[in-house]
Amino acid sequence: MAANSAALAVYAGSPAMVDRTLLGRLSGIATPALVLWGESDQIVGAAYGRAYAAAIRGASFELLPATGHVPQMETPDLVVQTIWEWDKVPHSA
């Protein structure tokens, strides 16, 4: 969990994982993207995930059931399965 937090601080910004420039920078992503969000996230609602996906040209959004704020830790099999299924379909950015 400590390593996950350290990695998140690097790409999400700190302090307190706040990067007010992130949403504006997402449009610069030029590769296919999948935004995964926990349906039961009690910290950041799904509307944020949908906004992030909408800001990335051609991105897909998936709401993961029975999953909270840390999908990779809470439902890792579902995360991998969702990515695997998404990757089977051709995507363009």
Image (spheres, rainbow, N blue to C red):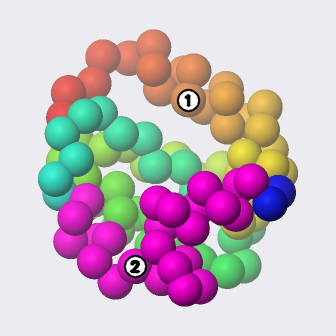
Q: Is disc 1 surrounded by few (<14), some (14 to 19) or many (20+) residues within 10 Å?
A: some
* Residue located beneath label 2 in the image: 19
In the image, which residues are magenta? 3-26
Secondary element type, mark 1:
helix
Q: Is residue 47 visible?
A: no
Q: Is residue 63 left or right of residue 91?
A: right
| Disc 1: which residue | 83
Q: Residue at x 74, y 53 (%)?
A: 3
**Closest to the observer: 25 or 90?**
25
Q: Residue at x 22, y 47 (%)?
A: 29
- Which of disc 1 and disc 2 is earlier in sequence? 2
Q: Is residue 85 above or below residue 40?
A: above
Using the numbered discs, state the Cα–Cα distance from disc 2 to disc 1 in whole angstroms: 25 Å
Q: Is-magenta flag for residue 15?
A: yes
Give the amino acid at mark 2: Asp
Quadrant location, the N terminus: bottom right
User: Measured along the vertical axis of the image, is residue 86 above or below residue 18?
Assistant: above
Q: Are marks 2 and 1 in contact (CB under 8 Å)?
A: no
Give the image location of residue 5, x and y in percent: 70, 63
Near mark 2 (Cα within 10 A), the count class, few <14, some 14-19 or many ≥20, is: few
